[in-house]
């Protein structure tokens, strides 16, 4: 009897050891830095840091990358492998263009990239495994292998060229490569004489919006960059920016009359969902607009132009904001402010603090509209 029990125990012990070994192998097999997947590739890849370091010389990237942050322009020295090489030579990408989605381990939303950009040799998307000679650890777990995706700047001052904690890169179905529309003829540049050094950050935005006929000066070559803007004036700017026309005023507000110069703009802005009235039935056309209100209006404009979806904007939260006064941003404006902050819209306006109730001036309004809708 004892012998049988001993044999049974020995058999059980062997089984436990075998299962533990299998479990250990499974854990090792699942450990990787990034997964390349999606219907747009022929082969799914699970790449470790060792895999990337073992790739041939033509896949390796070892150079400086410049990126922009709220603190200004920064540069890091990056070692990694070309994402274009990985997709074309290893994963067997099956399309000329498709949407490429990056998923971060902390679920922070990352704007989809276009495969045409990812494969562009000028942009040099890189799966970086070292930054300034150090392995990457953004999640605080040293044993986790991590990468950061960088790309080169398309234009000076551009934001959103660094994507941290990326664990999955998914290539979608093939799409048509968009044809660039013929540029519309614009009016001649208007020279404003009162854009002083204090407002040089807004000069390009003011000039571009003026050429498009979206904003006007005050006459005599003046723009009045420090002046405020009312809800009626912002209604006009947004309607012009979205390419809409004035429409017949329906008489929905007690403080807007059909004879008012802004009535048709207010109605068009309300119809587009850019503005809403107040519970007491007023629009308050002469009320000046604050930063938080301007953020909501600009984001609604971007949604109307299909530059972003409402669902995407809703994923951005003030908890991840770098602003010192992020808790002062009200819930009704939080997603919009957070999304615009992530796009770098406020980079030249608000650095350390957002100051949500501060009245927007004409220079800031031009920058926000231009950066959100036209940049």
Image (spheres, rainbow, N blue to C red):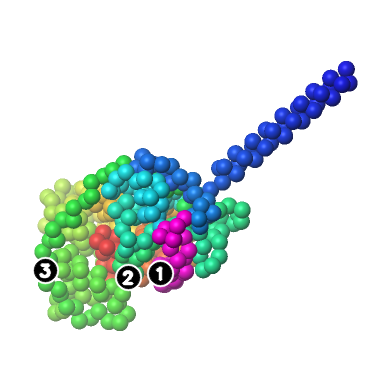
Dot 2: within a 10 Å radius of its alpha carbon, few (fewer than 14), some, or many (20 or more) residues? few
Give above or below for 14 relative to 202: above
Dot 1: within a 10 Å radius of its alpha carbon, few (fewer than 14), some, or many (20 or more) residues? some
Pointer 2 residue: 156
Pointer 3 residue: 187
Point out the frontmost of discs 1 and 2: 1
Q: Magenta segment: does it hold 74?
A: yes
Q: Is residue 61 left or right of residue 271?
A: right
Q: CA distance from mark 2 to mark 3?
A: 25 Å
Label 1 or label 3, whichever comes before in sequence order: 1
Q: Quadrant of residue 17?
A: top right
Is there a contact, CB below 8 Å, between mark 1 and mark 3?
Answer: no
Number of on-image labels? 3
Q: Residue at x 12, y 66 (%)?
A: 186
Residue 32 at x, y percent in the picture: 53, 48
Pointer 1 residue: 66
Q: Residue at x 41, y 72 (%)?
A: 73
Q: CA distance from mark 1 to mark 2?
A: 10 Å
Residue furthest to the front in view is 56
Residue furthest to the top in view is 1
Point out the frontmost of discs 1 and 3: 1
Magenta segment: 55-80
**Label 1: element kind:** strand
Label 1 or label 2, whichever comes before in sequence order: 1
Label 2 or label 3, whichever comes before in sequence order: 2
Quadrant in which the C terminus appears: bottom left
Residue furthest to the right in view is 2
Q: Residue at x 80, y 26 (%)?
A: 9
Q: Quadrant of residue 353?
A: bottom left
Residue 68 vs residue 194, the one in the foreground = 68
Is residue 119 visible in the rendered structure shown here? yes
Give above or below for 258 relative to 42: below
């Amino acid at each position: 009897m004892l012998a049988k029990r001993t044999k049974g125990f020995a058999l059980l012990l062997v089984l436990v050891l075998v299962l533990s070994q299998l479990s250990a192998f499974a854990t090792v097999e699942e450990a990787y830095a990034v997964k390349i997947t999606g219907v747009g590739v022929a082969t799914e890849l699970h790449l470790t840091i060792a895999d990337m370091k073992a790739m041939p010389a033509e896949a390796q990237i070892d150079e400086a990358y410049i990126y922009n942050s709220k603190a200004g322009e920064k540069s890091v020295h990056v070692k990694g492998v070309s994402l274009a090489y990985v997709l074309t030579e290893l994963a067997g990408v099956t399309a000329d263009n498709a949407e490429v989605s990056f998923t971060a381990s902390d679920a922070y939303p990352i704007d989809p990239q276009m495969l045409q950009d990812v494969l562009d040799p000028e942009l040099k998307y890189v799966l970086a495994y070292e930054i300034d000679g150090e392995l990457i650890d953004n999640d605080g777990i040293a044993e986790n292998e991590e990468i950061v995706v960088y790309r080169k700047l398309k234009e000076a001052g551009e934001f959103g060229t660094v994507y941290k904690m990326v664990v999955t890169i998914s290539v979608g179905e093939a799409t048509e490569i968009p044809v660039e529309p013929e540029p519309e003829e614009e009016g001649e540049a208007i020279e404003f004489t009162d854009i002083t050094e204090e407002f040089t950050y807004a000069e390009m935005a003011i000039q571009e919006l003026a050429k498009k006929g979206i904003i006007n000066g005050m006459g005599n070559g003046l723009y009045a960059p420090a002046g405020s803007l009312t809800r009626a004036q912002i209604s006009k700017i947004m309607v012009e920016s979205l390419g809409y026309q004035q429409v017949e005023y329906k008489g929905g507000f007690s403080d807007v009359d059909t004879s008012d110069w802004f009535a048709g703009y207010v109605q068009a802005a309300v119809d587009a969902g850019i503005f809403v009235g107040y519970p007491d039935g007023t629009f308050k056309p002469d009320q000046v607009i604050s930063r938080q209100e301007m953020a909501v209006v600009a984001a609604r404009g971007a949604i109307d132009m299909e530059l972003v979806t409402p669902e995407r904007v809703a994923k951005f939260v003030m908890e991840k904001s770098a602003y010192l006064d992020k808790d002062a941003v009200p819930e009704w404006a939080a997603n919009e402010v957070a999304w615009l902050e992530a796009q770098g819209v406020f980079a030249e306006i608000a650095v350390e603090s957002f100051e949500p109730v501060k009245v927007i001036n004409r220079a800031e309004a031009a920058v926000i509209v231009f950066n959100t809708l036209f940049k």
